[in-house]
Image (tube, grey):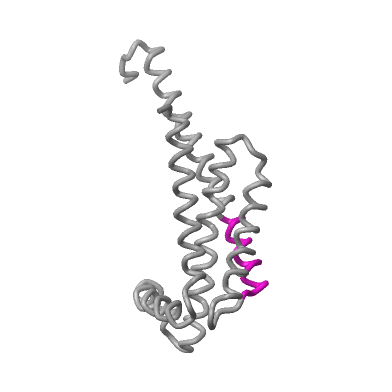
Amino acid sequence: MSTFSKRLTICRALLVVILVFIWGNSLMPAELSEAFSGWVKEIAARLLPFLSSGNEEKGHHILRKIAHFSEFAALGATLLWLARLKGWKYSMPLVVGICAACVDEWIQLWIPGRAGSVTDVALDSCGVLAGMILHIIGYAMYRRKKSEVFNEEADTDADGGADPA
């Protein structure tokens, strides 16, 4: 299996895992979802003290919005990776990510105690875009570092491997 095929397989598998995680959370009934969020909130409050200070409901709401944004940022970064591998335009991952956000909220319309929200679609879409931007920045940093290593090796080879000092 070529390196390209391996990368494509890993990317596709990661994409499936992320979508199963996102939509799996949306399929949870409200009681189960709130219990899971409460458990995560207890752990997160140790790292982010503002979640446990003051209004308990507000902290829970903030955590859920951070989770939505983060899930979709991971989706956006992975979709952009797939787009790069397949040679697609960068608009494709954004459109697919927005569609995934719409499906996520549509799923919640059918789950007891849950509700779909246009504001969540907007937040999720911003997460997709942020993930794409982070991917672009990370990839540029990787390419720069790779180029620096390549140039250092070329300089060493040109000097005959001798230490310049």
Between 22 and 39, the residue placed more toward the observer is 22
Q: Is residue 85 shown in magenta?
A: no
Residue under the point 60% across and 59% down: 100
Task: State the predominant SS element of the stretch in magenta.
Answer: helix
Q: Which residues are magenta?
A: 116-130
Q: Which quadrant of the rendered structure holds the N terminus?
A: top left
Check the image and report above or below for 5 versus 92: above
| Residue 143 x, y percent position in the rendering | 50, 34
Q: How many marks?
A: 0
Q: Is residue 152 above or below residue 65?
A: above
Judged left or right of residue 1, residue 104 is: right
Eyeballing the image, is 98 above or below 38?
above
Using the image as rendered, state which of residue 151 and residue 65 is in the foreground.
65
User: Which residue shows up at 49% across the image and 86% down it?
Assistant: 57
| Relative image position of residue 41 (x, y in whole percent) | 40, 77
Q: Position of residue 10 (x, y in %)?
A: 43, 42
Residue 11 location, x and y as percent? Answer: 47, 43
Quadrant assignment, res 156: top left
In the image, residue 160 above or below residue 31:
above
Side of 105 where 162 appears, left or right: left
Residue projecting furthest to the bottom: 55
Quadrant of the rendered image containing residue 130: bottom right
Residue at screen point 56% across, 48% down: 79
Q: Quadrant of the C terminus?
A: top left
Q: Is residue 126 magenta?
A: yes
Q: From the viewer's perspective, tell me whether residue 148 is left or right of residue 120.
A: left
